[in-house]
C-alpha cells in the first residue's frame, strides 16, 4: 500500500516541540512528528517558533513535508516517525 494523508488535521505537541500529523497505509494509522527546528527554516526570519508559527509553517510546506514523510516511511518501518531538519536537506 501507499502512504496517504487523507486527513489534514495536525496539532502542536508542546512536550516534543513538534507538529503531529497522521498518515494512513491502508487501514493502518502512521503517526508523524516534525520538529519545530525543521519548520523554522520555512518561517519568517527572526520569528519565534510558537505553536501558531509552527502550525502556519507546517501548513505552508505541507506537500513537501508529506513527500519527506512518504520517503522516510518507505525506507524504514517504525511505530512513529520524527522528522528533523536533516530529513529536508
Image: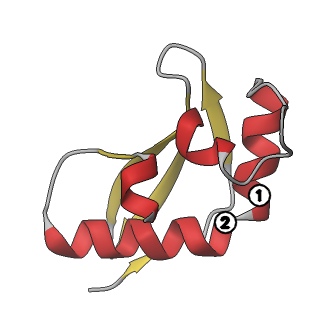
Q: Is residue 33 left or right of residue 30?
A: right
Q: Is residue 46 above or below residue 66?
A: above
Residue 65's x, y, as percent? 55, 65
Q: Read off the residue under disc 2.
A: 62
What x and y, as percent, mark residue 36?
Answer: 59, 34
Residue at the image point whose x is 76% and y is 58% from the top: 59
Q: On the rendered image, what quadrant is the C terminus found in?
A: bottom left
Marks 2 and 1 sit apart, C-alpha to C-alpha, by 5 Å
* Front residue of 9 and 60: 60
**Depth check: 48 or 68 in front?**
48
**In the structure shown, which secondary structural element does the residue marked by tag 1 occupy?**
helix
Q: Does residue 38 sit above or below 35 in this rendering? A: below
> On the image, which quarter does residue 33 sit in?
top left
Residue lying farthest top?
A: 15
Residue 19 in view: no
Q: Which residue in the protein does label 1 denote?
A: 59
Amino acid at each position: 500500500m501507499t502512504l496517504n494523508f487523507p486527513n489534514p488535521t495536525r496539532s502542536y505537541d508542546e512536550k516534543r516541540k513538534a507538529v503531529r500529523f497522521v498518515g494512513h497505509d491502508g487501514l493502518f494509522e502512521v503517526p508523524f512528528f516534525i520538529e519545530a527546528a525543521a519548520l523554522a527554516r520555512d518561517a519568517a526570519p527572526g520569528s519565534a517558533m510558537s505553536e501558531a508559527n509552527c502550525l502556519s509553517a507546517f501548513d505552508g510546506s505541507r506537500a513537501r513535508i508529506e513527500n519527506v514523510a512518504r520517503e522516510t516511511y518507505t525506507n524504514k518501518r517504525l511505530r512513529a516517525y520524527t522528522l528533523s531538519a536533516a530529513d529536508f536537506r
